[in-house]
Amino acid sequence: MILKACIFDLDGVIVNTAKYHFLAWKKLADQLGVNFTHAFNERLKGVSRMESLETILKSGDIILDEQEKEELAAKKNNWFVKYLNNMSVNETLPGVVSFLDDIEHNHIRKAIGSASKNAGLAIRKIGLEDRFDLIIDGTMVSRAKPDPEVFLKAASGLGLPPAQCLVFEDARAGIQAAHNGEMKCVGVGNPDILGEADVVIDSFSNINWTTILTLLNSK
């Protein structure tokens, strides 16, 4: 197995913007009278904004026309962007910068493959915009995970075949997207949720490229 690039989801992998998605969706759900919990939020990870809204509306048996849905999605996004604008470099998740340093030392290319339309803003706020060769975000794709479009575009943008790219994800839909694109995937987080990944790490703390290769080769 020859791996030449890593493609990282953003939320919950590089930076904990997932908490801001939760706060913004919960604020909207509360206004709609829908019970929104952390368990419910797990269903929205890696899913597009409009699909997430549809899930919330369906849970509350709420029927709206397309214009109303667009207005609610925009309202949620405005709240989310306000949260992002208050981010700092300290919100990069533990071990991420050291891992990026290590894979650069090993001549591994790096891309972001995120469903978020605000991925560029988040990366700038934590000061990592110069650490990635490419950012593919929700403004560049039309199909949400588990469709592999975002990861395939990242691989194409790097000039590499999918089989030479390794995806890092914290959501089941993202793991499925990686596999649908014929890429190996490392789950970052809870193994009970991410068991479909090829390997799972709880975080990037004390993880380097050699560790990842060893884990993958042991499977």
Image (cartoon, rainbow, N blue to C red):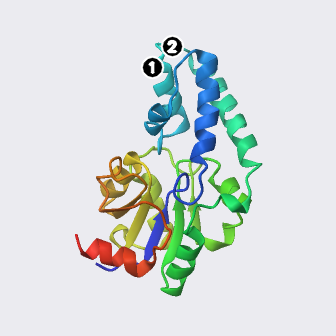
Residue on which the image places disc 1: 58
Question: Disc 1 on helix, strand or loop?
Answer: helix
The answer to the question of whether label 2 and label 1 lie on touching residues, with beta carbons closer than 8 A, is yes
Residue 20: % across, % down: 63, 42
Q: Residue at x 47, y 54 (%)?
A: 150
Instruction: Give amino acid for label 1.
Output: Lys
Task: Please state the horizontal and vertical placement of residue 104, each as a whole percent of the image.
Answer: 54, 82
Foreground pick, 213 / 162: 213
- Name which residue lies at 67% across and 36% down: 77
Rendered residue at 46%/31% (across/down): 40
Up-down relation of residue 102 to residue 6 (above or below): below
Q: Quadrant of the C terminus?
A: bottom left
Q: Position of residue 15 (x, y in %)?
A: 60, 57
Please tell me which residue is depicted at 38% across the width and 74% down the height of the picture.
212
Query: Where in the figure is residue 142, as x and y percent of width and height?
Result: 50, 44
Relative to 22, is 90 on the left or the right?
right
CA gap, disc 2 and disc 1: 6 Å
